Image (cartoon, rainbow, N blue to C red):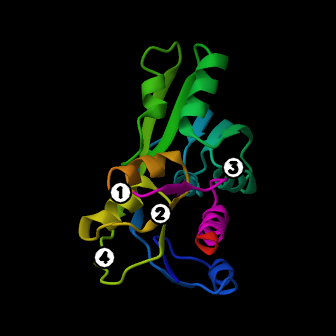
Amino acid sequence: MTVLSTKILTDTQKGLFQNSGMDVLDYDAIFIEFLDFEAPQFVKNGIFTSQNAVRSILGKNIQISNAFCVGEKTKQLLEENGQNVVKMYEYASELAEFIQNNYQNEEFYFFCGNRRKEEIPSSFKNSKNALFELKTYKTDLNSVKFDQKWDGILFFSPSGVQSYTIKNSLGITSVFCVGKTTAEEAKLHIKSPIYIADDTTIESVIEKAINTLNND
């Protein structure tokens, strides 16, 4: 069996497939470009829904008192760089609900990309809190045509799905997604079952793919 990953994997991650008797081809379906942006030096509340948003502020000397984030890897990256993570959820909708239920008359800065979803901004529309949105990075689609058929395809973002399906059809291929938001995008392009990883990590997506394909 051969699996396609729409994100470059480490040797250790590739080894998980090889140890299971599977071949894997990997490429980056998207490229990230960090942007110049202006932000206050002192931010009381900062929101991060991706690791790229965290990377975009590194070296900028921005001091954030309280960080709110989506995903375990995003939390880990924030903490590795000395940030105080107040709350982490696996999905932006859950984080948005927490903020609106627990804060009033506060200002939040949302560090995000140009393809960010609406969950965070929309939650502030009828809120007593204020949101300042900072576009700190840009996601470019790297669309590649493949002639090969895959037993499974791994997707790690809605943008990755959009990039792949520009030049390729998902057909009846098994699709493995990092989370619900990515799966919702995949559903627009496929009628076959879509499998969602148990956790929002690359390793969890790989584990879901290996266990599912080996049991088919």
Assign a secondary structure to mark 4.
Answer: loop
Distance in Å between CA atoms under marks 3 and 1: 32 Å
Assign a secondary structure to mark 2.
Answer: strand
Badge 2 crowding class, 10 Å Cα cut-off, few under 14, some 14 to 19, many 20 or more, is many
The structure residue drawn at horizontal position 41% and vertical position 35%, both measured from the top left corner, is 118
Q: Nearer the viewer, mark 3 or mark 2?
A: 2
Q: Is residue 194 magenta-colored?
A: yes
Q: Position of residue 157 (x, y in %)?
A: 46, 56
Residue that mark 4 sits on: 144
Q: Mark 4 touching mark 2, by CB under 8 A?
A: no
| Lower position in the chain sequence, tag 4 or tag 3 | 3
Distance in Å between CA atoms under marks 4 and 1: 18 Å
Q: What amino acid does circle 4 point to?
A: Val
Assign a secondary structure to mark 3.
Answer: helix
Residue at the front extreme of this rendering = 216
Q: Is residue 157 magenta-colored?
A: no
Residue that mark 1 sits on: 190
Residue at the left extreme of this rendering = 167
Q: What amino acid does circle 1 point to?
A: Ile
Q: Position of residue 14 (x, y in %)?
A: 62, 81
| Lower position in the chain sequence, tag 3 or tag 1 | 3
Q: What amino acid does circle 2 point to?
A: Val
Residue that mark 2 sits on: 175
Circle on res. 75? 3
Distance in Å between CA atoms under marks 3 and 2: 26 Å
Marker count (numbered): 4
From which residue to which does the magenta span run? 192-212
Distance in Å between CA atoms under marks 1 and 2: 9 Å
The structure residue drawn at horizontal position 60% and vertical position 63%, both measured from the top left corner, is 205
Q: Mark 1 touching mark 2, by CB under 8 A?
A: yes
